[in-house]
Amino acid sequence: MKTSIPVLFGLLAVPLLLTSCATPRPPVAFYNKDNTALVIDSLDNNTCEVIKPTPQGKQQNVQVLTEATKFSQHQTAVVILENYDEPQLGSQFRDRATPLFVGLRGLGYERIYFLQGKGVNNPDGLLTLASYD
């Protein structure tokens, strides 16, 4: 009888676990609370544009990261992924986000947000794809 009680509790927990995992997380809108945040508009795998703190024209990702070293130290970086259309995070996200994430982390940014772009330069209200604290 002792072995049947743990098995019974285990079987009762299975439906709870299955239903909790099956519910997708609703999309979360981003609202920038850090006025000193670096905001980058990523146009494709290779091209970005710094929007804030000092707007700059289109540049290669490496050039944007080099320029970011010249800004006073920030804690938050926001990357808007334009032309991003995956229904779930996948290879397109990894290909675009990984080099920027590694570069920004290497520069000391503690909080990095990736947002789904809609052709606007203001990140407020855009959907958060991923956040790293």
Image (cartoon, rainbow, N blue to C red):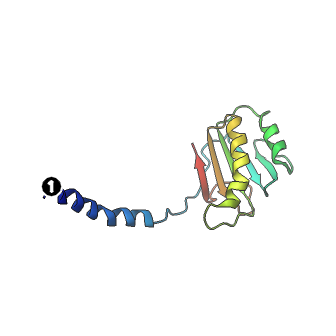
Q: How many marks?
A: 1
Q: Nearer the viewer, residue 105 or 9?
A: 9
Image vertical order of residue 88 relative to residue 115, above or below = below
Q: Nearer the viewer, residue 68 or 20?
A: 20
Q: Secondary structure at mark 1?
A: loop
Quadrant of residue 105 within the rendered picture: top right
The percent coordinates of residue 75 (x first, y second) are 64, 36
Q: Tag 1: Cα neighbours inside 10 Å, few (<14), some, or many (≥20)?
A: few
- Please indicate whether residue 22 sits to the left or right of residue 110 in the image: left
Q: Amino acid at mark 1?
A: Lys
**Residue at left 80%, top 33%?**
70
Q: Is residue 109 visible?
A: yes
- Please indicate whether residue 10 sits to the left or right of residue 107 in the image: left
**Residue at left 75%, top 64%?**
83
**Residue at left 76%, top 53%?**
41
Image vertical order of residue 86 relative to residue 121, above or below = below
Image vertical order of residue 98 relative to residue 71, above or below = below
The percent coordinates of residue 125 (x first, y second) are 62, 58
Q: Quadrant of the C terminus?
A: top right
Q: Nearer the viewer, residue 9 or 57?
A: 9
- Please indicate whether residue 99 sits to the left or right of residue 22 in the image: right
The percent coordinates of residue 59 (x first, y second) are 86, 48
Label 1, on which residue?
2
Q: Quadrant of the N terminus?
A: bottom left
**Residue at left 69%, top 49%?**
98
Q: Looking at this rendering, what residue extends furthest in the left direction?
A: 1
Q: Is residue 122 visible?
A: no
